[in-house]
Image (tube, grey):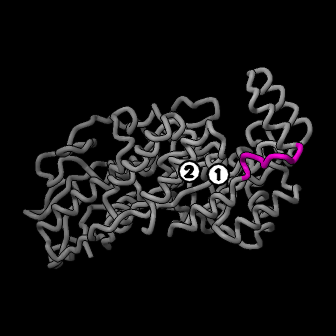
Amino acid sequence: MLLVYTHKITPRLRYSFNHFFKNVLGVEVEFTTKLGVFIAQSGPKFSYTNTPLGNEFFVHSNSLLFEQGIQEIDIEMSKWDDLPAFLGCNNSSMIPFDVFAASFYLISRYEEYLLHVKDENGRFMSRNSLAVQHDFIDMPLIDLWAKKVMALLVDKFPELSSEGNMMAKSIPLVEVVSPYKYIHKSLLRNLVQFFMSLSKFELWNIVEQFFVLLGIWKDPWDNFNAFFKLFKQTDLKPRFFFLYSKITYYDQGISVFNAAYNSLIKSVADYHKVSLLVSTEARQKAEQFKKELESFESVIHRNTKFIQFNLGVTSVFETYRNVLVLEEAEDFSLGYHDQFGYRASTAVPFNFYDLSNEIETSLILYSLVASEEVLRTRSAFDAFAKLKQLKDQIPTASGVHVFSVTNSILCDHNKNSAWREAYSNYILIHDKKE
């Protein structure tokens, strides 16, 4: 156990320290504002306040963890050895910046509450983030800071335990917006697909659509048996997310009344964890979110506590406010649609902090380091090499490597062969028997 002396205990302070020590490092932390209690403690301890009490391990505190509300913060970047740092502090501090306030700024997604430009889908743009602007988006920076702080504390307090060299675990995700490319869709939608292919001179797609609808060829996106076979060779626990909503411009799925679709969801649920891919409308409306979740659970005949959002997270306070109606929930959407890396600068799952109400919620967020949309901004080989690099640099066993593909990635067309092979190899070679 680690004791921390501070002049004021706030929800922000508890939240930041608990993630830093308990979640990332596996070290319990307690707080005191009583000087006598701190002095009497003979075990590991340090002070986090404005001025040092004596010659103890001291970290100078920024005001951020003692404030309420949201305001513009002047960020000046620096370096802590080889790691980026900000919110610098005075020379009496054992660490040259307030690592706990900086961690809170990143993990609470503070910058997403400030005024920002959104993309065409209403999403916070990656280029507006501190991590992208200062080139640490592909680093689990909070976790790397935590390892350095732990090394300093262990040097002073050898009795503090330090974890071994266990590897972070992986959770591969499969997003199923539409399990079928052609079948189980209306005549109108197939006609639209046909004329779109014709206008782009995609003759192969026209031939493919014709033979699939005649029942001669299998639908190219119906690859679930291939996923079953692939994951059966590993110890991985993948999660499948199915869109289960009315068909809209943004949510081009299969009708929830389609018997074949419902049967498919049930069959996948027999082998793996399945849950809801939340529609864009449900992301905005709490009633629609509740309706979709209840409808989906009625199909699989069990409750589900984990979700993902179709088209991702807009900003954290807009996206997650409707999820808070659930007593317990886990979200696997927190990433960018155009960037590899860690949107919240941590690979360790963490509770969502609601800055609007200054409260730590029960909603657990997982960092999504790459979706298929991001992967396909590179060649298949380079994309999965980058994905491996991201996993290999996770510094603690508490980290979780989360990445997402769609069901179409195992399509066996020649033009998709590189992606099918690269994904299969990544699962079998880099994520086998963890």
Q: Is residue 14 above or below residue 131?
A: below
Instruction: Write the residue at 83% across / 43% down.
Output: 212
Left or right, 127 with reference to 122: left
Q: Position of residue 272 (x, y in %)?
A: 64, 68
Closer to the chain start, of discs 2 and 1, is 1
The reply to whether the magenta stretch includes residue 101 is: no
Left or right, 433 with reference to 202: left
Disc 2 and disc 1 in contact, CB within 8 angstroms = yes
Q: Position of residue 215 (x, y in %)?
A: 87, 48
Question: Which of these two is toward me, 80 or 259?
Answer: 259
Q: Is residue 185 above or below residue 5?
A: above
Say whether residue 66 is visible: no
Q: What is the C-alpha distance between the residues marked 2 and 1? A: 7 Å
Q: Which residues are magenta?
A: 214-222
Which image quarter: residue 37? bottom left
Residue that numbered label 1 is attached to? 175
What is the chief secondary structure element of the magenta stretch?
loop
Instruction: Write the residue at 43% across / 64% down.
Output: 169
Give the residue at the far left of this rendering.
Answer: 55
- Tag 1 secondary structure: strand
Instruction: Write the residue at 68% across / 48% down.
Output: 283
Residue that numbered label 2 is attached to? 404
Instruction: Write the residue at 39% across / 41% down.
Output: 137
Q: Is residue 185 above or below residue 360?
A: above
Q: Residues within 10 Å of mark 2 (few under 14, many from 20)?
A: many
Give the amino acid type for the residue marked by disc 1 in the picture: Glu
- Tag 2 secondary structure: strand
Give the residue at the far right of this rendering.
Answer: 187
Give the amino acid type for the residue marked by disc 2 in the picture: Ser
Which image quarter: residue 72? top left
Quarter containing the N terminus:
bottom left
